[in-house]
Image (cartoon, rainbow, N blue to C red):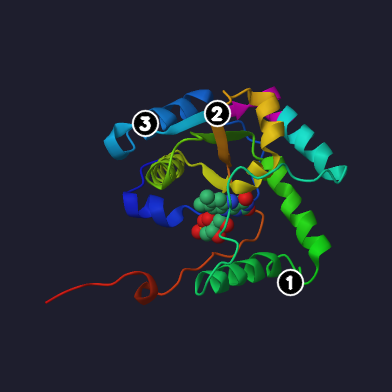
Amino acid sequence: MILDVYEAVTSRRAVRRFTDRHVPKEVLERVVSAAAWTPSGSNVQPWRIFVVTGEPLAQLKKRAGERLAAGDPWDEPEYETYPPALKSPYCERRFAFGQEHYGSQGISHDDLEARQRAAAANWDCYGAPAALFCYIDRTMGPPQWSDVGMYLQTVMLLLRAEGLHSCTQMAWSKYHKTVAEVLSPPDDLLLFCGMSIGYEDVTVHHTRTGRAPLSETVTFVEN
Ligand SMILES: Cc1cc2nc3c(=O)[nH]c(=O)nc-3n(C[C@H](O)[C@H](O)[C@H](O)COP(=O)(O)O)c2cc1C
């Protein structure tokens, strides 16, 4: 599948329903081999990636699902997913996303139980047969976290070139101990996120998540 970069960028979106179609290992290898060319400050390459399929992924989904069903509280967070007091305009954007995301599934803002039920699909990787788990060394700071973000976007764009879709998920950090049980990462690593990978279930209706007008996020400085 030949996609130009613009097509790869604009056709990428968070897909939340995948088919069970097998993702060949050589495709995943090709993607992570090319993604290794992601730039990073002083080339430290601070990402540490686990690509997970088959029985280990089934185990992960099962264990997370069991914790969820048992009402087990989330693990002690290893980083703050959002600032405690998200200021304007970011809090409005986050709220609007929630409205749109849950609204499109017929779930009202106040229906916490239905929202939690919908969110549970995170820990089934939205049905995806492949996933990656992205760790970063605990000692790394904001510039290295930004390097990791670039790495993840590179992976997502390459997946598009392979006809695959993805969904990055900080939700997996809520169950980082369960992920660690299955993946046994070294203790000096911290789980940033998971990423579900697979072929989109095109029978599921989706709404495209919009973006703030450019005037809110970009300033052209000219003479
Ligand atoms: C770092 C990061 C973490 C995310 N975590 C989750 C998650 O836990 N669950 C989920 O369904 N989507 C998650 N998303 C997807 C975002 O909600 C999505 O990218 C955003 O709303 C923009 O929509 P789009 O990707 O479809 O354009 C995450 C995205 C990023 C970049």
Q: Quadrant of the C terminus?
A: bottom left
User: Local crowd at mark 1 within 10 Å, few (<14), some, or many (≥20)?
Assistant: some
Q: Magenta part mainly helix, strand or loop? A: helix
Amino acid at dot 3: Ala
Q: Nearer the viewer, residue 100 or 40?
A: 40
Amino acid at dot 1: His
Q: Quadrant of the N terminus?
A: top left
- Can residue 202 be seen at all in this image of the molecule? no
Label 1, on which residue?
109
Amino acid at dot 2: Val
Badge 2 residue CB within 8 Å of ligand 1:
no
Label number found at residue 36? 3
In the image, ligand 1 is in what quadrant? bottom right
Direction right: furthest residue = 70
Q: Is residue 11 above or below residue 147?
A: below
Q: Is residue 123 above or below residue 206?
A: above
Residue 198: x %, y % from top left: 58, 39
**Disc 2 to disc 3, how far (Cα)?**
14 Å
Q: Is residue 72 left or right of residue 33?
A: right
Label located before the other in sequence (2 or 3): 3
Q: Nearer the viewer, residue 219 or 31?
A: 219
Label 2, on which residue?
51
- Residue visible at 32% across and 49% down? 4
